[in-house]
Structures are given as structure tokens and as C-alpha cells.
Amino acid sequence: MESRSFFCGAGRWMCVIIALLVSGCMDAEDGPVAVLVAPETGGAVLFGEELATLPLLLADHDLAVDGAVELEGWWASWDMEKGAGAQLRSEVYPLAARRLSSALGLSGTGEVISSNARNLSSIRALGGYLESEAINAAVESAGGLHEQALEAMGVGDGVRALELSLEAADALWGVSPRQVAADLIQRAEEALGRNPEPGAYSQEELTRVRRLMYGASEALEEGDYPRAIRRAYYACQLLGANPP
């Protein structure tokens, strides 16, 4: 996929800051472009090349039916509390890696590793534009896992390399616009469901929160992630539930 085409024909993405192109760190012809989405609220990163996640790889190799259990577990993990979700994915990775490795072979696994490398390079090229602790932590985690995947490939352990590469891609997925929006909506829902003490919020505030949450959920379903992020972020702000 040509990286520039990823951003064409979507007027709703005009609010995205195309920081990488502005910085001149990388020509769009040379590699995928990473851009910041809604950085003034719950900042996320839009990758110009699709992340090599488990669902994408299973679909690309016609293994979605055979790998239905892993696929279901992967999606379910993102609806859980972070620690529990990470634990479930750690159980899914080895199963998925074994299933995928026979279809990909070492060359295909190498392509997955290269995809992660390109996306890491594109987000690192944003440099000083990145002020989000969550994004920086995701990059650090993905980078470490990517290096381990390279080491595993170096000794011919393709299955382990693929397992680590799936985990690296997921570290970046955690700061993708879709996932950031979903996380903020879930955070707001949990805060609203804690039954605040009477008088903690005015009726006007609660009405505004519910409108913001409805608008965020609607935007998420429509794929308008910047709007979903902003509305969910402001709902969290009113509820005192924004991440540190």
C-alpha cells in the first residue's frame, strides 16, 4: 500500500496533525507515514501501514476460521482491564504463532518483522512532536520486543520471532486511534457506573457527560476516531477519570 493513499478521501481526518511530513524527516515514498491524532486530548498515532496484528495476519492467510479461538481471545482481551487483557494475549500469542508460522514460513515472518520496523521508524521520526507518556511507553515496549524478535530470527527460531512480533505490533496497536478511543469510552463508562455520591455532579453535568459518551460511541462505530477520542476524553475529564 502506498502510504500517502492511506490518508486520501477522508475529510474527517483533516484534524490530524501531519507532523512527520511537516518535519521533513521522511519522504512519503520511502516508508509509511505516522501522524498524531487528537494530540491535545487523548493522543493517538495513525500508522500509514497497517499494523501486523493477529487479526490482520489470520485474515491475510485465510486462517480466520481455523484461528477463531485465538481471534476471539485477542478481541476480548482489549475489553478487559489492562493487566488481565495482557495476560490473555500472552496465552494467545504462542498458539497464534504456531498456527501462522507454517503459513508464513521464515520469509513471511521476516516480512512481519520488517513491517514492525517500518512502523517503529515512522513513529520515532515524529521526534519532538511526541509528548504523550503512553505513546512513548508503547514505542519503548514495541522496540524492545522487536529487538528480541530479530534475535530469535537470528538463531532460526521463527515461531518465537513471530510470537514476539505479534506482541510488538500489539504494543503499537494500544496507541492506535481506534484503541485509544475505545479505552477512553470504557474509562468513562466505568467512572459513570461507580454510583457517585448524591450531589457529586449536577444534573447538567451528568446530561453533558451522557451526551459526550453517546457521541463518542457513535463516532467510534462510524470510524471517526478523532471525534470519538475528543468526546470520550472530555467525558472522562468531567468525571475526573482521565489517565495521568
Image (tube, rainbow, N blue to C red):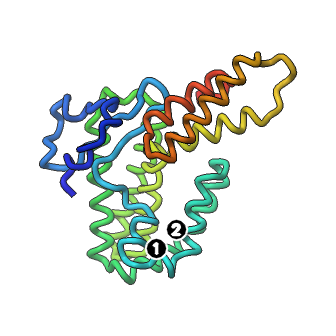
SS state under label 1: helix
Say which quarter of the image contains residue 70: bottom right
Q: Residue 147 versus residue 228: which sits nearer the camera?
A: 228
Amino acid type, mark 1: Ala
Q: Residues within 10 Å of mark 2 (few under 14, many from 20)?
A: many
Q: Residue 207 versus residue 65: which sits nearer the camera?
A: 207
Q: Residue 49 versus residue 139: which sits nearer the camera?
A: 49
Amino acid type, mark 2: Tyr
- Give residue 84's position: percent from left, percent from top: 67, 54
167 over 23 or under it: above or below:
below
30 over 219 or under it: above or below:
below
Q: Residues within 10 Å of mark 1 (few under 14, many from 20)?
A: many
| Residue at screen point 55% across, 75% down | 68
Indicate which disc residue 173 carries: none
- Give residue 65's position: percent from left, percent from top: 50, 79
SS state under label 2: helix
- Give residue 159's position: percent from left, percent from top: 42, 75
> Is 103 left or right of 122, judged from the image as shown?
right
| Residue at screen point 47% across, 75% down | 64
Contact between marks 2 and 1 (CB within 8 A): the answer is yes
**Residue behind mark 1:** 97
Which image quadrant: the C terminus? Answer: top right
**Residue behind mark 2:** 93
155 over 204 or under it: above or below:
below
| Residue at screen point 32% across, 27% down | 129
Q: Residue 128 versus residue 59: which sits nearer the camera?
A: 59
Q: CA distance from mark 2 to mark 1?
A: 6 Å
> Is 203 left or right of 29, judged from the image as shown?
right
> Is 98 left or right of 243, judged from the image as shown?
left
- Give residue 51's position: percent from left, percent from top: 37, 56
Which image quadrant: the N terminus? Answer: bottom left
| Residue at screen point 52% across, 72% down | 94
